[in-house]
């Protein structure tokens, strides 16, 4: 007797549960700074890196970073991409309209911050542009407070 | 290395949808490998499985593929990263002198049963990037692509040329999942834009796939095959995580991993000595970027190299004659498939993809956002 004729069905097995992550004092202070519309970083005593958002270890030289510094609201658009799709929960889908994401190097920072770029047509965006932070009117200490960057 | 270790056999397959289960895929690969070599499961001394708990939707995901792999009541453990790392660990086990044979098996059903994009989406920093909800695997790669082409003043057309060459090679290769006949750079340039400058055909395709490989000590290898492929060198390296702190136009970790592998293998001038390279480039720009890091292409020479066909199957230094990861990327299996494809070249079994003189190969696997982790092996006959 041969193998039985094959039928295939794919049961869907959702994973629905919650992970908790302790954020720690560095991101807590970063978001506290957002309440005053300030952008904080941490400075490395070894190599001078100013990381935004701040954290305890330097990813370059492995020293402890303890000094918190306020960085500028303006910076340079180091890199950007125009998104024509979105990827959420693994699903790649066409975007409603093209949108711009950028890596912004803020004054006094050495690392670049990933953010939305607005106030400009996507086709006009160029690397090297000067941009500035645009905040929500009411800052609540959430990541969303820093809404996007726009050309100076 | 004091003990010589060889690849003595391999099996691999991929498709957008293999219409299979994980257990069945593992069984068909390993049973096929045993039959190719005329061995049974008890001839395999130790095994490293490569599967991913997150992508398999199950913790300790090796527990359900141990039995079909025939490794119950044997020595087995698991790697969750790219399986090029698993090959290195398996080789190390033989180098201890305790084992004569070591099997590596990797599988992923990331074409039909789980989205490959979840893998990087859920590796992102949960207290920052996953809160800000802007970053994903493809836009991170787009930043890397922009950084690379801007650095050297390349045109975006370079990406189309790289992808067209890879996909043309993939079309010739029965092991590949994405096989498009009559592919051209213009057809690549007409594919859907994802994140500028990356289009659909510059990116890997969601793929089901698996690969099984048997390694053996020199003594055992000679019993099992008359075409051993020797592991001459290997190295790994990981760089810092945050994209905003990395020079995205280069891969310092791939360079370090390659340096370690070349040192063990006694390779001094890789661009001259290496005959063929199999590089896990998940996105078109990563092929020259990684080739530069691995000393196979001069910095800033990519446009020239692709225009002159230097990396084509008949070129001076063929890169990804198999079609590479633009042809198939079963998540975490891709580096293992590169190892198997290089072995296929060195054994002269590569059919339409065969490179003329293939005696020394370099193989690369990657993991993480924009290839944060890299593993490199040097193989030879
Ligand atoms: Zn430092």
Image (cartoon, coloured by chain):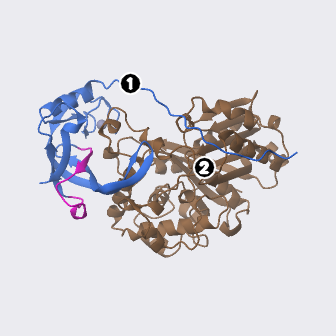
- The chain ID associated with circle 2 is B
Residue B102 visible here:
yes
For the N terminus of chain B, the quadrant is top right
Residue B336, how many percent across, how many down? Answer: 62, 48
Chain coloured blue: A
Q: Are marks 2 and 1 in contact (CB under 8 Å)?
A: no
Q: Residue at x 24, y 36 (%)?
A: A143
In the image, is A19 to the left or to the right of B374?
left
Q: Residue at x 33, y 61 (%)?
A: B151
How many C-alpha atoms fall within 10 Å of the one at disc 2: few (<14), some, or many (≥20)? many
Residue A127, how many percent across, how many down? Answer: 24, 59
Chain coloured brown: B
Q: Is ligand 1 less than 8 Å from the beta carbon at label 2?
A: no
In the image, is B259 to the left or to the right of B153?
right
The magenta stretch spans which residues? A110-128
Give the secondary structure at mark 2.
strand
Q: Which residue is mark 2?
A: B208
Q: Quadrant of residue B313?
A: bottom right
Look at the picture and state if B324 lies above or below B308.
above
Real-space Cα distance between discs 2 and 1? 32 Å
Q: Is ligand 1 less than 8 Å from the beta carbon at label 1?
A: no
Residue A62, how many percent across, how many down? Answer: 35, 33
Q: Identify the disc placed on residue A20.
A: 1
The quadrant where ligand 1 appears is top left
Residue B164, how many percent across, how many down? Answer: 51, 69
Look at the picture and state if B239 lies above or below B311.
above
- The chain ID associated with circle 1 is A
In the rendered image, residue A118 lying in the magenta stretch gets the answer yes
Give the secondary structure at mark 1.
loop
Q: Quadrant of residue B99?
A: top right
In the rendered image, residue B128 lying in the magenta stretch gets the answer no
């Amino acid at each position: 007797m041969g193998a039985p004729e094959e039928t295939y069905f794919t049961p869907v097995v959702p994973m629905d549960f919650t992970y908790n992550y302790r954020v720690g004092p560095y991101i807590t202070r970063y978001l506290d700074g957002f309440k005053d519309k300030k952008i904080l970083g941490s400075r490395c005593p070894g190599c001078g890196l100013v990381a935004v958002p701040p954290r305890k270890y330097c990813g370059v030289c492995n020293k402890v970073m303890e000094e918190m510094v306020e960085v500028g609201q303006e910076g340079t658009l180091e890199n950007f991409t125009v998104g024509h799709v979105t990827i959420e929960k693994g699903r790649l889908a066409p975007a409603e309209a093209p949108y711009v994401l950028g890596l912004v190097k803020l004054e006094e920072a050495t690392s670049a911050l990933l953010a939305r770029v607005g106030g400009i047509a996507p086709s006009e965006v160029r690397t090297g542009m000067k941009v500035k932070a645009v905040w929500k009117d009411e800052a609540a200490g959430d990541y969303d407070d820093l809404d996007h960057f726009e050309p100076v | 290395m004091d003990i010589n270790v060889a690849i003595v056999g391999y099996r691999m397959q991929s498709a957008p949808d293999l219409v299979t289960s994980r257990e069945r895929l593992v069984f068909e690969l390993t049973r096929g490998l045993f039959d190719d070599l005329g061995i049974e499961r008890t001839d395999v001394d130790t095994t490293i499985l490569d599967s991913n708990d997150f992508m398999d939707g199950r913790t300790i995901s090796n527990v359900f593929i141990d039995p079909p792999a025939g490794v119950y009541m044997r020595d087995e453990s698991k790697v969750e990263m790219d399986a090029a790392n698993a090959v290195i660990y398996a080789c190390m086990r033989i180098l201890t002198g305790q084992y004569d044979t070591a099997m590596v098996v990797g599988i992923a059903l990331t074409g039909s049963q789980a989205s490959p994009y979840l893998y990087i989406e859920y590796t992102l920093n949960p207290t920052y990037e996953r809160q800000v909800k802007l970053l994903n695997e493809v836009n991170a790669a787009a930043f890397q692509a922009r950084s690379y082409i801007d650095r050297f003043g390349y045109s975006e057309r370079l990406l189309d040329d790289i992808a067209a060459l890879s996909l043309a090679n993939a079309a010739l290769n029965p092991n590949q999942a994405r096989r498009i006949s009559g592919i051209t750079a213009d057809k690549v340039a007409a594919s859907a834009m994802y994140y500028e400058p990356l289009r659909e055909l510059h990116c890997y395709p969601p793929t089901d796939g698996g690969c099984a490989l048997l390694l053996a000590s020199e003594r055992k290898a000679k019993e099992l095959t008359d075409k051993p492929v020797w592991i001459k060198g290997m190295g790994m390296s990981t760089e810092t995580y945050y994209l905003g702190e990395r020079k995205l136009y280069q891969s310092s970790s791939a360079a370090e991993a390659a340096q370690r592998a070349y040192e063990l293998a006694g390779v001094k001038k890789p661009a001259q000595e290496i005959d063929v390279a199999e590089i896990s480039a998940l996105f078109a720009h990563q092929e020259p970027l990684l080739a530069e890091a691995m000393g196979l292409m001069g910095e800033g020479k990519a446009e020239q190299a692709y225009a002159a066909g230097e990396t084509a199957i008949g070129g001076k230094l063929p890169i990804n004659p198999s079609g590479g990861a633009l042809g198939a990327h079963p998540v975490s299996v891709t580096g293992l498939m590169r190892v198997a494809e290089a072995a296929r070249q060195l054994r002269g079994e590569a059919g339409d993809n065969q490179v003329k003189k293939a005696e020394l190969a370099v193989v690369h696997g990657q993991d993480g956002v924009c290839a944060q982790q890299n593993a490199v092996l040097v193989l030879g006959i």
